[in-house]
Image: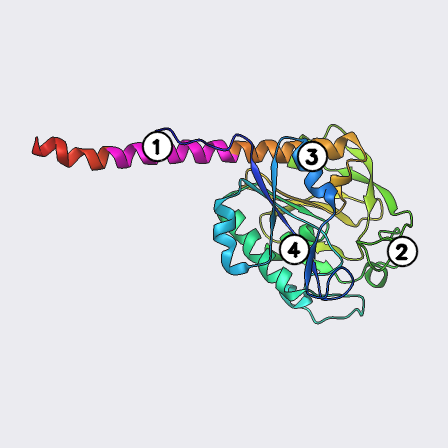
Amino acid sequence: MQTKFQSRPVIGVTLDSEEAGGYADFPWYALRQNYMNSLAELGAVPLALPHHAELADEYLSMCDGIVVTGGAFDVPPELFNEQQTSDQVRLKPARTEFEKAIVKGAMQRNMPLLGICGGQQLLAVLTGGTLHQHIPDALPDALEHSTTVDTENAGGKKRARHPVEILEGTLLSRCVDRDHYEVNSSHHQAVKSVGPGCIVNAYAPDGVIEGIECEDYDFCLGVQWHPEYQQHPQDTQLLNAFVAASARYQQSMRTAGKAMTEVMNDVIARPGKEQA
């Protein structure tokens, strides 16, 4: 009997979370639909990942790629060896612990990984980088990178926008067909430095790091903006490249699984042949 394989890559998407109040009287998960819609439109099967760090391996076994989303919260300064210096820093410990496990597990498997906004910042920190805790404090001459303090809920206001420069020779430059274009901007923190094996792939005109990627991986990349809005063709190109990388990962796992099955079948059958 042949095993039926999923033909479309499954991409795990991390959720945001909130405490009781508002939507429900108990803690609840939330995520904008365009994260899921944009991936489904490009041929992937998006899968929401609840915050259970102890289940990270099980989640990863079902996935061919991982998207670490943004949200109205920040990476704890202690993760990059700093004390909290800004009162604008908002923490969600359970979400961070879960996403740490998912990012580390995906990288160990060389599974395609896309960090968006806060997801990029976590990727930077987990690979040895550091963050500006609050851009206006650290870089007073910077462009407007966020319209509101609550970066995930602009309250109907027009979000900040600015150009980015994509650095030549990077994975990001191979994903999109322009080296300069305008992106949305909704973040009050930013990557300050990158660790070993990680490089910058995009800058804002004020020098703020807008994209990073990890070398020696098939697809391990973060951007500070939100391509899931697909406001420009380059956003769609980036997401499409990520979905394609996830499809390659899926195929490689199928091939490896088939080869392992053939080896095991041969090992199981061999003693019977010898006895005959």
Instruction: Tell me if I can see residue 266 in this picture.
Output: yes
Please state which amino acid type lies under the numbered disc 4. Answer: Leu
User: Which residue is nearer to you in this view: 56 or 24?
Assistant: 24
Please state which amino acid type lies under the numbered disc 1. Answer: Ala
Residue 138: x percent and y percent? 82, 62
Q: Nearer the viewer, mark 2 or mark 3?
A: 3
Q: Residue furthest left?
A: 276
- The disc, 2 or 1, on the residue closer to the chain's N-terminal end is 2
* Span shown in magenta: 249-265
Question: Which residue is under mark 1?
Answer: 259
Q: Nearer the viewer, mark 1 or mark 3?
A: 1
Please state which amino acid type lies under the numbered disc 2. Answer: Asp
Question: Which residue is under mark 2?
Answer: 141
Residue drawn at (73%, 44%), measured in percent from left and top? 33
Residue drawn at (64%, 66%), measured in percent from left and top? 93
**Is disc 2 in contact with disc 3, using a CB cutoff of under 8 Å?**
no
Identify the element where label 4 is drawn.
Answer: helix
